[in-house]
Image (cartoon, coloured by chain):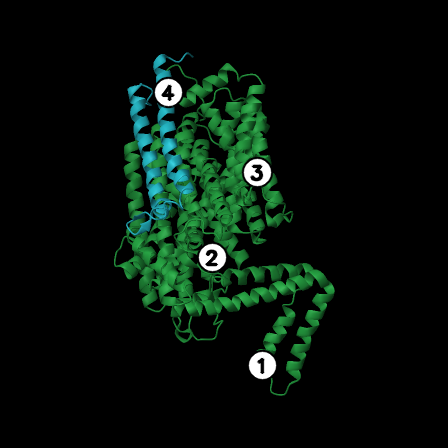
Chain colours: A green, B cyan
Amino acid sequence: MATQSTASFKSQLTRYYSFYTGGFIAFVILVAILEQMGVPNKMLGYMFLAATILLYAGIGVMSRTADVSEYYVAGRRVPALFNGMATGADWMSAASFIGMAGTLYLSGYDGLAFVLGWTGGYCLVALLLAPYLRKFGQFTIPDFLGARYGGNIPRSIGVFAAILCSFTYVIAQIYGVGLITSRFTGLEFGIGVFAGLGGILVCSFLGGMRAVTWTQVAQYIILIVAYMIPVVWLSVKHTGNPVPQVAYGYVLEKVTAREVVLNDPTTPDGAKEAEVRAIFKQRQEATEAKLKALEAGGATYLAEEKAKLEKAAADLKAAKDADPAAVAAADKAVTDFPADAAAAKAAWTKAAAGAKAKAGPIASHAEPFAGKDQAAIDKKRKNFLALVLCLMVGTAALPHILMRYYTTPSVKEARKSVFWSLFFIFLLYFTAPALAVLAKFDVYTLLVGSSFSELPSWVASWAAVDKTLMSVTDINKDGIVQLAEITIGGDLIVLATPEIAGLPYVITGLVAAGGLAAALSTADGLLLTIANALSHDVYYKMIDPHAPTTRRLAISKGLLLVVAVFAAYITSLKPGDILFLVGAAFSLAASAFFPALALGVFWKRANKWGAIVGMSSGLGICMYYMYMTYPFFGVNAPLWWDINPISAGIFGMPAGIIGVVVGSLLTAAPSKEIQELVDHVRYPNLTGDIDTKAA
Amino acid sequence: MQLSQKHKEYWQKNLRITGILLALWFVATFVIGWFARDLQTITIIGFPFPFYMAAQGSLVIYVAIIWYYAHYMNKLDQEYGVHEGDD
């Protein structure tokens, strides 16, 4: 294939992927027919899971390679369009596919920070990095730092930062894989993690970047089809218009009107809502009173409270005609009672916050930075913009994304490829806000006001699966659902849309396959980045520069296996919140890489010491702020200027830029060779130029 | 290796277009974001303007920025004779 011309390679690819798309649609139709014939849902779930993972493994086997350039950069002949699709899949993770619409549902305008941040960052990739990295044309991002700044220290910091942010990110992805496989097949979470991982490994293990690229193109096709079908259907149901992105403006108007009604106690619906909110207000106050008593009484108070509950349970059992349900509830209250003061404080603080959220009026979906006073509004605005900036700059600094632009045939194709990347990402990202509004309309108008005796079937079925995703409780005992009585977990929105839209189970399976494709494709790219940083940058470039090709690849593959198993092990311990892990990866990448990469191209004077000082201070400040303020680490220091820990990069980035500038100006200008290297990357083609291309 | 005057001009033009497009990116993202509450009364096909921009409008601008940059630079490469061979 290496001798083939670009044009015929491209048309061959187009043919392959057209066949593949057709085959996939045929498979979905086949499953739909099986469903009509009465095959149980669980079997259909297994079929989707097995078929897609086998498919990815199959592409992996077909793309196996022992060539270094094929293994690291897919032979540098991926056409712009296909690299765009691969980048799209590489980029869109479980958080985008499953989490984003839910975040938008729950936080309205403020959630759009993710939509803006995860698309606008490509402007920085296109304008500041991709074409220059392509011209440089080696294998990894630390490669660029090593060559541009000279010596092993910048490269080593680059390796450390690449591993740190990719590993943080990959854990969130593997978590998503485990969640989807366990939910749709009934396998245990831990087993689901390893089953999904098997598919990733066969693929990247055999063919490295080459296999990952062609699998990612396949995964993009599945995930975009899976995302679109239910949303289009829902849009037709509510608006009669099959283009949800256009139609939902008017639905948003209706949602806003409905919010006003539900927040107004003089309307019948609003009065009911006020009634439920008053009950939550009481609960909040009661829990807060308990917290205060705990503060004063400590362990003694806790013991007294527990004794009261035990006595109540014993009394109930002693009574002759005790209601078994009441006895069970009393027993449960005793067993669930917090074991010590710290646990009690945590549990009750959470309960009070939950009740408080339900006691307030509903926030308007379209209103930016809603808050009770100007200070609250300003704080939200500041955090919104800070998060947008961190996500954007992080996008332009995550090694697994930048690496993809090494794989195009030329600088020209790299520029076009960023366009295709963002175009394919845009298709999903401008649909997610539409889905959130359509789902909200459904809940606000159809679910609210319906009777508890005849809930829509999707509500009942999801409430049975997972209470954190969907639960409705008749708080004021009127038999009618009020909005404040509904608890929805963000992930529900995408997962339940096919059922909300009244589609058959096969579409639910398709959505699960799409979510799996999103998580696996990102995990693939990340694992490869980590393994390559270790094998190429650490082993080949620093330890044994004379290592033969076979040994380099063997070490790379071995490390891939070790990293994957280690990541899966960490994930099975279920650390922390997915959204925070993802956000943290962006802040870390933005602080560590972006200043040194961008200034490396645009400022010739930047030198080795600048890079060392800039990267370590950026990364250091970012990690320090996260450690001090993110509750998981338990320090809980006061925030700087009210900036949330997820946007720690807002402090790391300026530290990084100042570090590069000051460090460079205090030491000697870089050598003539390095300045020539900068000229080399700035021009797609220079006569009499040096050559930095790796084989 | 010495860069010719023409090469320097190419780089200046590149910096200029990069600066202009980054300014556009900045306005579409941060200026509109900053004034979001003040622009709330304007409506566009049913959407409040800031919501529309953050959910769609700015995204379209980003795609257009990248398309225009690729188009402009690929032409500029030809014009200044720094384009790559056909492979």
Foreground: disc 1 or disc 4: 4
Residue picked out by circle 2: A181
Are the residues at dot 4 and dot 3 in contact (C-beta closer than 8 Å)? no
Foreground: disc 2 or disc 1: 1
Are the residues at dot 2 and dot 1 in contact (C-beta closer than 8 Å)? no
The residue under the point 38% across, 60% down is A260
Residue picked out by circle 4: B12
What kind of element bears circle 4? Answer: helix
Left or right of residue B76, residue A186 in this image: right
Q: Are marks 3 and 1 on the same chain?
A: yes
Residue picked out by circle 1: A324
| Mark 3 residue type | Cys
Distance from disc 1 to disc 4, alpha carbons, whole Å, reads 82 Å
The chain carrying label 1 is A
State the mark number for residue A622.
Answer: 3
Distance from disc 2 to disc 1, alpha carbons, whole Å, reads 37 Å
Distance from disc 2 to disc 4, alpha carbons, whole Å, reads 53 Å
Q: Residues within 10 Å of mark 1 (few under 14, many from 20)?
A: few
Count the labels in the image: 4
